[in-house]
Image (cartoon, coloured by chain):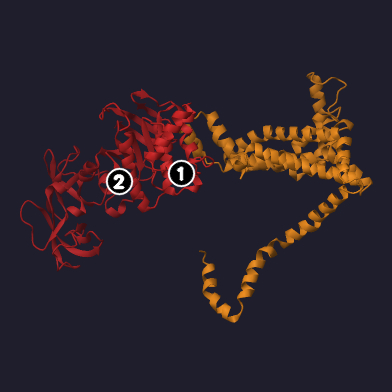
Chain colours: A orange, B red
Amino acid sequence: MTVAAVPSRVRRPRRERDGDDTGVSARRWFTPWLLIAPGGLWLLIFFILPLFSLGRLSLEDGGLSNYSTVISDNSTVIIRTFVYATISTVAAIVIGYPLAYVIATKGGKYKNFLLALVILPFFVTYLVRTLSWKILLFDGGPVVAILQSVGILNDNQSILGSPFAVVSALTYNFLPFMVLPIYVSLEKLDHRLLDAAADLYSSPARAFRKITLRLSLPGLFAGTLLTFIPAAGDFVNSELLGSDRTVMIGQIIEKNFGKEFFRPELSALSFMLMAMILIGVIVYARLLGTEEIA
Amino acid sequence: MASPTAVDLSAPVIEIDHVVKRFGDFVAVDDANFSIRQGEFFSMLGPSGCGKTTTLRMIAGFEQPTSGAIRLDGVDVSKVPPNKRDVNTVFQQYALFPHMNVFDNVSFGPQAQNVDKATIKKRVSEILEVVRLTEFASRRPAQLSGGQQQRVALARALVNLPKALLLDEPLGALDLKLRHAMQFELKRIQREVGITFVYVTHDQEEALTMSDRIAVMSDGRVEQIGTPAEIYENPATVFVAGFIGQANLWSATVTDRSATSATVSALGGSTLSGSCVADSVRAGAPVTLMVRPERISISMNPPCGDMQSVNAIVTDLTFQGPVVRLALSAPDGSPIIANIDPDADLPLLRPGHNVWASWAPTAACVLPDAPDQPRTLDDIVVEG
C-alpha cells in the first residue's frame, strides 16, 4: 500500500457522510481520461478522422474493385517498394547491429560520444542530408570516379538514378533508428549472463546466439519497425537520387495527391500500403517469436 | 552419494599452487597455496576485498593467475577458458537466463555439451527433484521467489556433475530466515550429490555452520586453513580471532615461552598464560592474548584451582536472550567482555561492582602481533 493511499482510506467515511464520495470516485475515474485527452483528441482529429474519410473515399465509385485496380496498375512499383524497404532494413541490421554491439560492449567512456556520432546526421534536415548524397554520387563525383578507376563501374555507367543509390540512401537515412534501439537492449544486457553461459560450457559463439542475440531481439524488432515502415513509405530518396526505374509507392501517392486530391484509387493505394506494412510487421513479429518481444 | 565408486576423500580435486593475482598495482591474491579435497565443503571466508571471489573466479576460469598454477584433478588449467573447465559456478545474483524457463536454464549446460535429449530430460528432472523444484520446470525466473531462483542456479550448475561446484556468496541476496533454511538445504544437497563445494562468503556464521574446512582470507592472503572448530578455538592470527566469532584481544608482553604455550603479562600486570604455536613469539615480544567471551566466568570471590583470573569492575550489563553480555574494566582499563548464563546466580552484579573474571588456561591463546593489526573488537570492521 502506498503512503498516499492511507489518508484517503481514513478520511473516506467522513466524506461519505458529507455526501462527497461520488465526487471523489468520479474524479478518480476521470483523471486518467483527462490525462490522455490532449493526445487522444489530437490523434482523433488529425489521424483517425482523416484516416476514416480516406478509407471511405477509397471505396467510392468502384468499391473494393478500386483496390484490385491499383494493385494491378502498380504491381511493379509495389513489389519494388517492398524489395527496397526490405533490402535497406536488412542492410541497416547488418551495419547497425555490430555498430551498436561495439558501442554498448566496448565503448567504455566513449559510449556517449560514439552515440552522439550516430545521431549527428539528424542535426541536418532530412532533405539536405539526402541532397548531399547527390553531390557524393553524381557522375563526376568522388564515388563514381573511384569505382570507375578500380574497374567496378564502366566509364559510361553512373550510380545516381540506380536502385543502388536509392537503397543506399534509404539505409543511410534510417540507420540511426536501427542502431539506437539495439544499443539500448545491448546496453542493459547483464554481462554476468555471458559468464554463466561460458561457465556452462558454451563457446563465445553459442553464448552470443543463445543469450546476447535473444535478449537484444526486442531492440532488433523495434529497430526493424522504425526502419522498415518509413523506408516503405518514403518518397524523398527515390525522388532525389533515383530515376524512372526506381519509382516507389510513396512517390506515386505524393505526386498524384498534389494534382488530383480526392481520387478513390489513390486512397486505395495509400490504404494498401498501410495494410501491407502492417501485415509485414505481424509476420515478422511471428517469425521472431512474440514472446521474446513482449 | 551419486558416485558408485568409493571416493578417496584425501585426494585433492583443486590445487591452488602459489597463485598470485595482480590488477595493475593492486595485489588481489597474494601467494595463495592450498588444496581442496574430493567431496569436501570448503569455504573461503573474509571481508570484502580479501581476494576470495578473485580466487574463485580463477578456479572458474574468468580470471587467470598472474603467476602460479591452478590444477584440477592434477591437470594445470590456468590457461583453460571457463567453457572448457569441468567446474560450475553458482553466481552471486544467480545470473539465470531471464528468457528461458527453469527446464531450459537447467539444461543449458548439458545441451552445450551435446548430451542427447533423453539423457538431458532424465538428468534435469532428477536434479530438479534434488532441489525440490519439479513442479516449477516451465516457469520463468521472474516468476520465482529469491529462494527458488537460488535453487535453480544450484540445479543449473549441479546437473553437469562438475568436479567442483563454486558458490559465490549464493545466499547473500536472501533474507535471514531463508538464508538459515538454505544453509541446511545446501548441506543436504552436497551430501546427496557428493560433489566438492567451494563456497565464498563474508558471513562467518555461514562458513562455520556448513564447512568441512575454512580458509580465512584477509588482504589477499590466506590467514589460516582449518576445520571450523580449529579456527574458532585456535586462531592463528589476531585477524582470524577477531573475524570469527567474538574475541577479547588484549595487548600483552611475553615473559616466558614453552613449546606449546606462553606466559604473558597483561591487563595491568597480571601474569597469565595461554596456548601458543607461533614461532615468532619469544620472551619480551609484544603479543595479543585472546579469550572468547563465553569462556570467561564471573565470580564474587577469587576462583580456586588452575584458573586464570583478573580482578575487574563491571561497567555494563546487556541481556541478549540466550546470554547476558557483561562489559568489565580490567585494572589497566582494558575492556573485558564476558557472555554469561542468564541463570547464573549473581544477584549483586551491577555496574560498579568488583568481581573476578576467570577462565581455563586452555581457553586462552597467545597470538603474534602483526604491525598493523586491529587492537580491539571495535576496530575489526565486519561487513553485515
Residue A287, picture quadrant: top right
Residues at circles 2 and 1 in contact by the CB criterion of under 8 Å = no
Picture coordinates of residue A154 (x, y %)?
A: 84, 19
Mark 1 = which residue? Answer: B136
- Crowding around mark 2 (Cα neighbors within 10 Å: few <14, some 14 to 19, many 20+) is few
Q: Is residue B7 above or below residue A131?
A: above
Q: Residue furthest left?
A: B305
Position of the C terminus of chain A, as image quadrant, is top right
Ranked by sequence position, the earlier of labels 2 and 1 is 1
Left or right of A156 on screen, residue B224: left
Mark 2 = which residue? Answer: B372
Picture coordinates of residue B355 (x, y %)?
A: 13, 63
Name which residue type carries label 2: Asp
**Which residue is at 61% across, 38% downward?**
A103
Q: Is residue A177 above or below residue A146?
A: below
Is residue B25 visible in the rendered image? The answer is: no
Name which residue type carries label 1: Phe
- Secondary structure type for disc 1: helix
Is residue A157 visible in the rendered image? The answer is: yes
The disc numbered 1 marks a residue on which chain?
B
Q: Residue furthest top?
A: A151
Left or right of A21 on screen, residue B86: left
Picture coordinates of residue B133 (x, y %)?
A: 42, 43
- Secondary structure type for disc 2: loop
Residue sitting nearer the eye, A197 or A65: A65
**Which residue is at 29% across, 43% downward?**
B210
How many marks can you see?
2
Residue sitting nearer the eye, A269 or B92: A269
Left or right of B366 on screen, residue B53: right
Residue A130, picture quadrant: top right
State the separation of the CA atoms marked 2 and 1.
Answer: 52 Å
Residue B40, picture quadrant: top left
